[in-house]
Amino acid sequence: MTERMGFFTDTSVCIGCKACEVACKEWNQLPDDGFVFEATSYDNTGQLGASTWRHVAFIEQTRTVRMKGDEDAGVDRWLMSSDVCKHCTHAACLDVCPTGALFRTEFGTVVVQEDICNGCGYCVPACPFGVIDRREGDGRAWKCTMCYDRQRGGLEPACAKACPTDSIQFGPLDELRERAEDRLERLHADGRPEARLYGESPDDGVGGAGAFFLLLDEPEVYGLPPDPVVTTRDLPSMWRWAGAAALSVAGVVAVAFSGSFAGGIAGFRNGGRR
């Protein structure tokens, strides 16, 4: 495997232009989602899905702050963040795929092979982030590939290439983690104590994400689980229990069979003496 590659999304410089969404759709030839008017937000794409592999979340808040003269006032704040598949170190979607349609690339990312996916959908509930999705009318599962084809050609993913503020940064994962730590320290020094990294730690519930974020509020505010855990974490112990149970059943059957066989031999011998 070559050096593991990843995304670092610095939401503190995201301007919500959605150039990443457009670039992703154009390069990967993703179908149009249609015009969606949410009525509660300027966000016109809503969420990640089978045909939206990058989604810029608009979080529109009104906060109460203390103004000069000790008067409380409401201040509007917009948080913006370009969300994407996390390409987990321990990827549950990959664990549960029965056909091998999902595989880990030489860059450490997780990709769905559309010509092998049978549309069973096991991967959808397995993802702790709710990223992977089946496309209506198609049935197969789809998600971000981190532009696997572009990486193989020595190019950066289309979303990172299109980002005008470098909110989306692409590169070797270890290098990105160092860059993120430096940026976090700078924000703290500038009086932004709420800034935090999300998904960068190899000790978290998914073994560290291949796509991690610098956030300016709690993960839940951005629609991210605060403590994601790989849903297949208990599979090894479950297989051990299943194996032990199978051995126990086989032992009981063997004992019963040997007892029956011994009884048959004894009966045959008794019958022979008659």
Image (tube, rainbow, N blue to C red):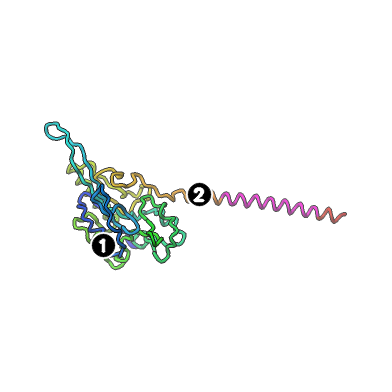
Query: Mark 2: few, some, or many residues within 10 Å (few <14, many ≥20)?
Result: few
184 vs 228, left or right, is left
Q: Secondary structure at mark 1?
A: helix
Query: In the rendering, which numbered label is found on residue 238?
Result: 2
Q: Quadrant of residue 147?
A: bottom left
Residues shaded magenta:
244-267
The N terminus, quarter of image:
bottom left
Is residue 246 a member of the stretch shown in magenta?
Answer: yes
Query: In the rendering, which numbered label is found on residue 239?
Result: none
236 vs 133, left or right, is right
Three-letter code for the amino acid on which mark 2 is drawn: Met
Q: Residue 249's x, y, as percent?
A: 62, 50
Q: Residue 8's x, y, as percent?
A: 27, 54
Q: Main secondary structure of the magenta part?
A: helix
The residue drawn where x is 36% and y is 63% is 106
The residue drawn where x is 24% and y is 56% is 169
The C terminus, quarter of image:
bottom right
Residue 95: tell me if it is visible. Answer: no
Total count of labels? 2
Query: In the rendering, which numbered label is found on residue 158?
Result: 1
Q: Secondary structure at mark 2?
A: helix
Query: Mark 1: few, some, or many residues within 10 Å (few <14, many ≥20)?
Result: many
* Front residue of this view, candidates 7 and 17: 17
Is residue 89 a member of the stretch shown in magenta?
Answer: no
Q: Residue 151's x, y, as percent?
A: 30, 64
Three-letter code for the amino acid on which mark 1 is drawn: Ala
Q: Residue 185's x, y, as percent?
A: 21, 46
